[in-house]
């Protein structure tokens, strides 16, 4: 069966520090991968998606970046965090082709102080 | 563009009460519609879906019917339990080749004994 894991689960970082959140998927090949952010009262915002290794599309201009160094690995990064980067970050995957279900990771809670 | 509007929360109900969470949408083409649920501290998981007009999605006692004439996909449950306390998200896939779901802002449900 397919599983998705992301870490760390909780992170407290000072303003201006770097960020790296990692997500891995097991049990499937060539998935679409996604990073969402959930801010209080604002629902889910798609940040990045990837349809293959090295292919990243950004939905929202920001100081975050994403990379997909391997088929089932998706990394969210920042060189310098802002207060506004605080939130709950969710990684997700889906199969290729006609739309079906998104499968979400457990989420990473980021607090920038 | 596509959009999803769901009722503002939070919603507080007593155990065994009837639940309705309203969801309406705007989309081009023939979207698929979804309800996702997020339990405290976790990622989202698919609750139910409907892929064409008049379809009824159901799972764990929850139901939602795809109403094209009213562009709605309201979530209902006849008798809620404390364990149903969560945030519920309505979402759509326009089916137009987009790689993202469009989510509503979420409705927080609290069920009290």
Image (cartoon, coloured by chain):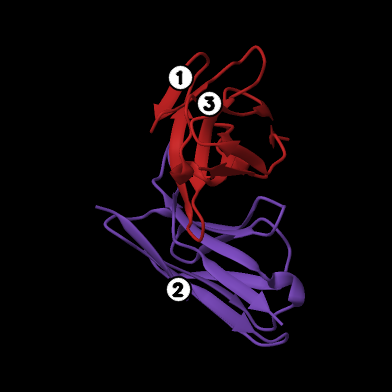
Chain colours: A purple, B red
For residue B101, say whether it is visible.
no
Chain under disc 2:
A
Chain under disc 1:
B
Q: How many marks?
A: 3
Real-space CA distance between mark 2 and mark 1, rounded to the nearest whole angstrom: 36 Å
Chain under disc 3:
B
Which of B24 and B111 lies nearest the eye of the viewer? B111
Residue A106 in the image: above or below residue B90: below
Q: Residue at x 66, y 71 (%)?
A: A64
To which quarter of the image does residue B11 belong? top right
Residue under pointer 3: B76
Residue under pointer 1: B56
For residue A30, say whether it is visible.
yes
Residue A5, percent from left and from top: 39, 65
Q: Residue at x 49, y 52 (%)?
A: B39
- Callout 2: SS: strand
Q: Residue at x 50, y 61 (%)?
A: B41
Contact? badges 2 and 1 (CB < 8 Å):
no
Residue B8, percent from left and from top: 72, 39
Q: Are marks 1 and 3 on the same chain?
A: yes
- Callout 3: SS: strand
Characterize the local packing of mark 2: few (<14), some (14-19) or many (20 or more) Cα atoms within 10 angstroms: some
């Amino acid at each position: 069966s397919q599983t998705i894991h992301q870490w760390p689960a909780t992170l407290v970082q000072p303003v201006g520090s770097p960020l790296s959140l990692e997500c891995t998927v097991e049990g499937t090949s060539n998935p679409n991968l996604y990073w969402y952010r959930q801010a209080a009262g604002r629902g889910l915002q798609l940040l990045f998606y990837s349809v293959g290794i090295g292919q990243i599309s950004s939905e929202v201009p920001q100081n975050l970046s994403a990379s997909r160094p391997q088929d089932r690995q998706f990394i969210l990064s920042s060189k310098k965090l802002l207060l506004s980067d605080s939130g709950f970050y969710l990684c997700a995957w889906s199969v290729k082709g006609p739309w079906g279900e998104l499968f979400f990771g457990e989420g990473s809670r980021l607090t920038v102080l | 563009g596509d959009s999803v509007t769901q009722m503002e929360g939070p919603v507080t109900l007593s155990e065994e009460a009837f639940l309705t969470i309203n969801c309406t949408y705007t989309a081009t083409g023939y979207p698929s519609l979804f309800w996702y649920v997020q339990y405290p501290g976790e990622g989202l998981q698919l609750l139910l879906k409907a892929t064409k007009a008049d379809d009824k999605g159901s799972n764990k006692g929850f139901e939602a019917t795809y109403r094209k004439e009213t562009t709605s996909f309201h979530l209902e449950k006849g008798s809620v339990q404390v364990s149903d306390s969560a945030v519920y998200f309505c979402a759509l896939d326009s089916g137009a080749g987009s790689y993202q779901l469009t989510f509503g802002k979420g409705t927080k449900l609290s069920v009290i004994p």
